[in-house]
Amino acid sequence: MSTVGKAVSLLELFTLHEPEIGLSDLARRAGLDKATARRLLMALAAHRLIEQEPRSRRYRLGAGLSRLARIRDAHFPFVRLAAPVIRELSLETGETVHLSEFSAGALLTLHVELSTKANRVNVDVGQVLPLHGTASGIAFLAASRLEAVGAYLEKPLQAFTSFTMTQPDDLVKAIALAASRGYSRSAQGYEEGVHSIGAAILGADGQPIGTLAVASPVSRVDDATAAGQGEAAVRAARLISARLTGEA
Amino acid sequence: MSTVGKAVSLLELFTLHEPEIGLSDLARRAGLDKATARRLLMALAAHRLIEQEPRSRRYRLGAGLSRLARIRDAHFPFVRLAAPVIRELSLETGETVHLSEFSAGALLTLHVELSTKANRVNVDVGQVLPLHGTASGIAFLAASRLEAVGAYLEKPLQAFTSFTMTQPDDLVKAIALAASRGYSRSAQGYEEGVHSIGAAILGADGQPIGTLAVASPVSRVDDATAAGQGEAAVRAARLISARLTGEA
DNA sequence: AACACTGGTTCAAATAATGAACCGACTAGG
DNA sequence: CCTAGTCGGTTCATTATTTGAACCAGTGTT
């Protein structure tokens, strides 16, 4: 792996649950020597992508990331525009709703509004979702150009649960259904016990750039509920698309 | 410079005004060979810190940055908590107000609320402010431990305008005045024609972590106005500090 | 047609990254 | 009090990665 890749993989060790990590721990988890890890951390710290807590000497993500992210967001205000709509949809459905952006062949979770119910689906910001096996992914593929779908189905499809669709034919049918309805439905394709309704968000050129999804415990969703969530998800996705392209 | 440093310096070429840049341009400005720049960009793109617009082939900051920044913000919700207070202060004073975080010996501008007046001070997110020469910096030093101030004054102080304080003695006096008043005042120390009032924001341990500043055209500020801005700035800074430490 | 750009690629040469061994400081257990 | 096992951090000969001049192919301009 390139040196830069190693440095970035250090950044990626930090999560919502573990926002501060010590040197030895970082090196171990990244599979790097302690000396190497430290040199990389110093290089990142020089540009403020990493900070070191002076007391504990542990490392954490730096302010430079906030700065770069703000530059990106100003140019491409996906999360900023979508967040209130996601929140509204979460309140309306009473379920967890998450927003993802397409990046490098997968969907990257950028924002989550959790259900207030005790029995709810938890999704983490930063989670990477595959296109097959999640409602978000099916919705994304259904809004993509045919050639993009074909290219994706060329590659082998990993099974995440016993319910994951791994046959291209099955996937094509699910995509067609999602395309005709405007939203996708998927149960337990990525994680056991999770039911999801997905809808694609389109950019200015009509191509999909991301998705939103309503995620519920399977036990709470019947066909009528799913249909209701689908309608609401489509409305929310269209609203975000419109705001992105300046139509609202 | 380390390879990692070069890669990050590529990221830093993107600004609010120029969020997409082509390969040759990037290489030229970073002082790198085209081949080197491209290899670094590919490494960054593999981790989604950079994206390439498929049509124009130009590069832009990637979604991975938004993701990392959200992880950081969740752990350290400085901007999220401060932004509404900054906005309120901007509306109250009618002037541009900006928020900075201390990082690696300087203040990094994280958030800005611009004055709605035609004649206003413009500050950019991402701008790095020196501790001497800005009201923010003086306020920060006034809230810092004496040893930290001493260490900073050891180093030579660069002059940015003919008004910049470069003598440690002058700076000590300004710091003492700011400490007694609770806010700092500085005119044209960093940029000609700009008057600023700064106040420090404190973390849970009582140490300063950043500042806010009210920036106006010098022509609009007399002593009474400055005093009013000072009181308002101190109130806002205290409110942010309190929210950060969970006291509100 | 010639020119000046662009993004992208190649491979021998030069440079930067690497990691085992080391340090001093700290903590837990005996 | 001692030992063992951590921790963060440093050193420097060895090694592997990075580097960049020269090279495509494509796209406008003159």
Image (cartoon, coloured by chain):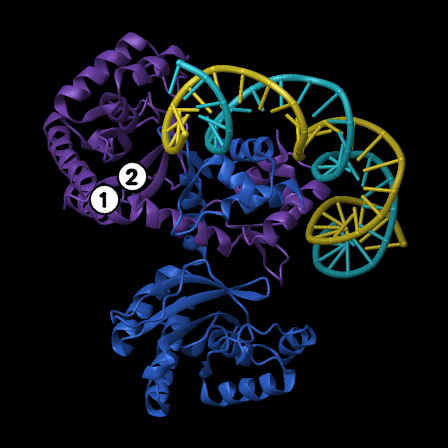
Chain colours: A blue, B purple, C yellow, D cyan
Q: Quadrant of residue B56?
A: bottom right
Looking at the image, is B120 positioned above or below residue A192? above
Residue labelled with disc 1:
B86
- The secondary structure type at the circle numbered 1 is helix
Q: Is residue B116 visible?
A: no
- The secondary structure type at the circle numbered 2 is strand
Where in the figure is residue B75, as x and y percent of width and height?
A: 34, 47
> In percent of the image, x 51 and y 40: which residue is there?
A26
Looking at the image, is A155 positioned above or below residue B199? below
Residue kind at label 2, given as amino acid type: Leu
> In percent of the image, x 36 and y 77: which residue is there?
A217
Q: In the image shown, does B103 or D7 lie closer to the viewer?
A: D7
Where in the figure is residue B193, as x and y percent of width and height?
A: 30, 28
Residue kind at label 1, given as amino acid type: Ile
Lateral position of residue A84 relative to residue B93, left or right: right
Q: Quadrant of residue B153?
A: top left
- Mark 2 neighbour density, 10 Å: few (under 14) some (14–19) many (20 or more): many
Where in the figure is residue A199, as x and y percent of width and height?
A: 44, 78
Gap between marks 1 and 2, in whole Å?
A: 7 Å
Work out which quarter of the rendered image holds the C terminus of chain A and state it. bottom left
Q: Are marks 1 and 2 in contact (CB under 8 Å)?
A: yes
Q: Which chain contains the residue that carries disc 1?
A: B
Lateral position of residue A224 relative to residue A163, left or right: left
Residue labelled with disc 2:
B99
Looking at the image, is B40 positioned above or below residue B198? below
Q: Quadrant of residue A80?
A: bottom left
Q: Which chain contains the residue that carries disc 2?
A: B
> In percent of the image, x 37 and y 86: which residue is there?
A226
- Mark 1 neighbour density, 10 Å: few (under 14) some (14–19) many (20 or more): many
